[in-house]
Image (cartoon, rainbow, N blue to C red):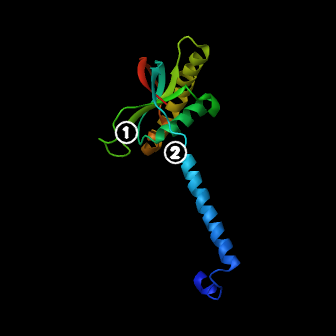
Amino acid sequence: MLNYHEMTMSESRDSPQRRKQFLIICSIIFGVLLNTIFVSGLLFPVEITEGVFPGGEFVYKFLVKDYAASMGTHLEIAKDLSFPANEQEDLLYSVFIDDMSHITEGKGRFMSGILTDETSPRSIKMRRTLTEEMNPKIEKIIKSLKKKKELNDLRFPQNIVYESGSLPSVVAGVA
């Protein structure tokens, strides 16, 4: 079997094929570098300013996992509420309880849920949907998982019941 270098040994160093290949490889590397710069936010840094967290009734799922799982929990909550991704802004929040530098990976405690306003009919409807309609369904799933002795599945967001609590309005960093 021949490798690439053995196959191109007879070509001259400055052949048009080699120049074309070099340009293609360089353009691919440049494209990957450019994509990395855009994705990393180097051109558009996030500026954190001081603002006010509104507070209110927080309907959430409490998990002990890696903090990266909070986005998956947001998706699960959005699916339970049946609303699209463009309507999630200023509704879905995560409250991270532990400092990850002081605990082991995957053991971070957090709450992900919706922040509701007691005066808004839409918020009241969302709170009812999660606590009164979804919780009984989730509790049935939990009972069936316990019967089957599949206890590892109990730590997934879709198998955790919604809880409710009140969050105060505080001064916070806003991105």
Within the image, what quadrant is residue 23 found in?
bottom right
Within the image, what quadrant is residue 75 found in?
top right
Is residue 95 visible to the viewer in this orientation of the structure? yes
Is 126 on the left-hand or right-hand side of 109? Answer: right
Q: Which residue is mark 2?
A: 42
17 versus 110 height, above or below: below
Three-letter amino acid code of the residue under disc 2: Leu
| Viewer-nearest residue: 159 or 117 | 117
* Residue at 63%, 84% in the rendered image: 8
| Viewer-nearest residue: 165 or 129 | 165
81 versus 4 height, above or below: above
Can you name the residue that lies furthest to the front here? 14
* Residue at 62%, 28% in the rendered image: 87
Is residue 149 visible to the viewer in this orientation of the structure? no
* Residue at 54%, 20% in the rendered image: 127
Please count the marks in the image: 2
Horizontal and vertical percent position of residue 106: 38, 44
| Viewer-nearest residue: 79 or 132 | 79
Q: Say the numbered circle drawn on residue 108.
A: 1
* Residue at 55%, 27% in the rendered image: 134
Comes first in the chain, label 1 or label 2: 2
Which part of the image, by quadrant, shows the N terminus? bottom right
Three-letter amino acid code of the residue under disc 1: Gly
Can you name the residue that lies furthest to the left here? 102
Classify mark 2: helix, strand or loop. loop
Horizontal and vertical percent position of residue 55: 46, 18
- Front label number (1 vs 2): 2
